[in-house]
Image (cartoon, grey):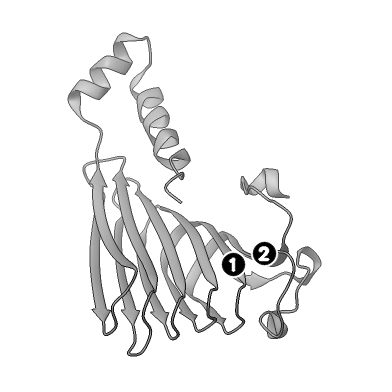
Amino acid sequence: MWNNFNIKTFPSETLVYVDGIFRPEFSTLDETEIFSKKYDLPIHIIYTGKIERENTLNINIIIENQPVFLTVDVENNFPGFLNIFIKNAGKNSELRGHIMVKNYSDFACKIITEHDNADTGILLQTKIIGYKNSYSKISATAIINKNCPNTKSDIRLAGYTTDKSAKIRFIPSQRIKSVPNFAEHSAYMMHITEPQENYLRSAGLSGTEVKETITEAFIKDFNLF
């Protein structure tokens, strides 16, 4: 299954969603008891497949010293919404997440990360690819509440359009009420430039192959965390 969805796995306790539906047969944890205790292995939340209409993923970390990983790899072919809410109240617990969206239609995503204890970490990288005639909007808000010092917050947004007709809009924001260890928030857009296209064409690639090569490079560049 993981080869089909291009998901990298490692020793962990898993919670798996496919097409927005929880799949207990692929999971080692129960959806209702995910943070009921401390696990020896990291927790890996996997959200993959195709999405339709409105989808919501809630992650509420309350256990101390628990590493959590999030992998989202989804495709949107119809007007769709994805809401991701992450709250970390587990002291010395950290979530590291990678989100990849391939959008062929109209898509909106709301991401809210909230630190509700000291010494918590949320590091999140979101990438979206906009294909021909698509419209994508991603709003990402990082919240560090009062009395939550020494937190680590890093929210990164990256977009790539494969066609001039595709549009991507980012709305980043921060609400910081305690002094963090660090609080980063960034967003950037990538397009195929004429020098890039000419260079790859000179190497013998067709126009389609040029787009495929640069798209694949954008997808695989998930090494920031």
User: Height in image: 119 above or below 3?
Assistant: below
Horizontal and vertical percent position of residue 217:
42, 34
- Dot 1 or dot 2: first in sequence order is 2
Q: To which quarter of the image does residue 71 belong?
A: bottom right
Q: Tell me the CA gap for discs 1 and 2.
A: 6 Å
Residue located farthest toward the left when viewing the structure as drawn: 194
Residue density around tag 1, few if under 14, some if 14–19, many if 20 or more, within 10 Å: many
SS category of the residue bearing label 2: loop
Q: Residue at x 31, y 14 (%)?
A: 201
SS category of the residue bearing label 1: strand
Q: Which residue is drawn at 62% across and 49% down?
A: 7
Residue density around tag 2, few if under 14, some if 14–19, many if 20 or more, within 10 Å: some
User: Height in image: 144 above or below 26?
Assistant: below
Horizontal and vertical percent position of residue 202:
30, 9
CB under 8 Å between discs 1 and 2? yes
User: Height in image: 104 above or below 153?
Assistant: above
Which residue in the structure is indicated by mark 1? 68
